[in-house]
Image (spheres, coloured by chain):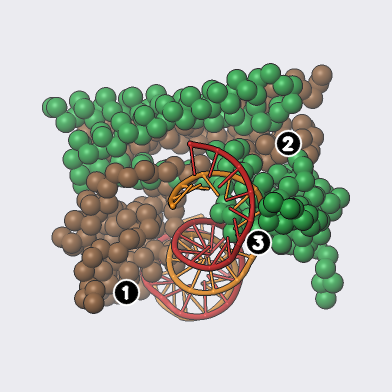
Chain colours: A brown, B green, C orange, D red
Amino acid sequence: MNGEATAPKLPATSYAVLGLLSFKEMSGYDVKQHADGSIRYFFWSPASSQIYSELRRLASLGYVRERRVAQERRPDKRLYRITRTGEQALRAWLEDSQPVPDVHKSLQLLKLFFGQSTSPGVLTEQLEERRRHTRQALAEFEEIERLLADQEQGFYAHLTLQSSLAHTHAELVWLDYAIEELSRRSSS
Amino acid sequence: MNGEATAPKLPATSYAVLGLLSFKEMSGYDVKQHADGSIRYFFWSPASSQIYSELRRLASLGYVRERRVAQERRPDKRLYRITRTGEQALRAWLEDSQPVPDVHKSLQLLKLFFGQSTSPGVLTEQLEERRRHTRQALAEFEEIERLLADQEQGFYAHLTLQSSLAHTHAELVWLDYAIEELSRRSSS
DNA sequence: TGAATCATGTAAACAGTTACATGATTGG
DNA sequence: CCAATCATGTAACTGTTTACATGATTCA
């Protein structure tokens, strides 16, 4: 039984790769680059080794088709292009609207929550370091926003970017508040 | 070699459990309840089975001490109390200030990013559902805030809660914006 | 009577990272 | 000359979830 039908439940990562391939034909290496430049900010970027095995899985499911390209001055490439079946699978996943939990894992908040086990000074330093980092991230997002603003393309990229901007900004406001509260606490 | 010294590198989850145990002596079951009520919001809540194996690991490292308690009307309990070694390990982890990456994994944003592969209507519905959910979450956080406001205790719980509030609020503002932009798009 | 709570665990599977291997080319 | 980039992969390991098992008690 189960000749080969009845779409298997794939992890979100598979659809992330499939989705990137829906933009254009790419090699595993390309997928990694694109992931690092976009979905990394609101989802995450898989290790190269995982991307390659993900591609093999997608190919074995018929969601993508592999095309070998020999190069002279570079190692051979394997280019992957999404198939009609793959497009259908991607659409089905996009349209499947069951509870979509959001994972927000902050090591820093975890540490802060256990703050009573250390000194306020240590935490303040960590939060200040974090603030520097977050300011930089905000600047990067604003730079991407400028680049994206011109083209009418990238409507959805724009929307997701706005989300990152909003969260980063909120984070920064909160950091100011937390650092202020901490200093008030340690000086009293 | 390695008689038993030189603190092994543990995953953050271990310190999450250890940190909860720094508040008071608890059973694995209790740890799960507490995790679901606090760190779940800004870190995550491990499965019960993982908590139990985490506790065994912490015990084997000497970070916690186990105490068996027989009960009449309930299954036997194993209560875990943090040791001095455990407290030191927790503090060392808290003070270790090397780059602390924040993971923000949003399935919804991933889907939205690939929005061109489906219709705006589908996405609008998903975002509206999400908005309902986020409003509820905001209400819950505000309720917790009220409960926490009274006691001078829970300063660090207060700070982390403010972070959740800030992010949830930012999310809501963005959702309004995104839904508006999407409807403008689909009607034009 | 059946679901929820208390309480702990095993087994199997999967997701994901890290370390490693290979090897040519390009740029400083 | 060394590092970075292009390009793909294997092997080993760890983290985490899911499904299952057990069994008493309480509450609707």
Measured as percent of width and height from the top left, residue A40 is found at 43, 48
Report the chain holding disc 3: B
Compared with residue A94, is residue B1 higher up or lower down, i.e. above or below? below
Q: Nearer the viewer, mark 3 or mark 1?
A: 3
The residue where tag 3 is placed is B53
Which amino acid lies under the numbered mark 2 shown in the image of this protein? Gly
The reply to whether discs 2 and 3 touch (Cβ–Cβ < 8 Å) is no
Place residue A116 in its image quadrant: top right
How far apart are labels 3 and 1 at the CA level? 45 Å
| On screen, residue A60 above or below B126 | below
Give SS at disc 1: loop
Residue C1: % across, % down: 44, 52
Q: Quadrant of the N terminus of chain A?
A: bottom left
Nearest to viewer (mark 2 / mark 3):
3
* Residue at image coords 33%, 24%: B176
Q: Nearer the viewer, residue A61 or B188?
A: A61
Is disc 3 placed on a helix, strand or loop?
A: helix
Residue at mark 1: A76
- Name the residue at 38% across, 69% down: A53
Badge 3 density bin: few <14, some 14–19, many ≥20, Cα 10 Å? few
- Tag 1: amino acid: Asp
Residue A47 is situated, as x and y percent measured from the top left of the image, at 46, 61
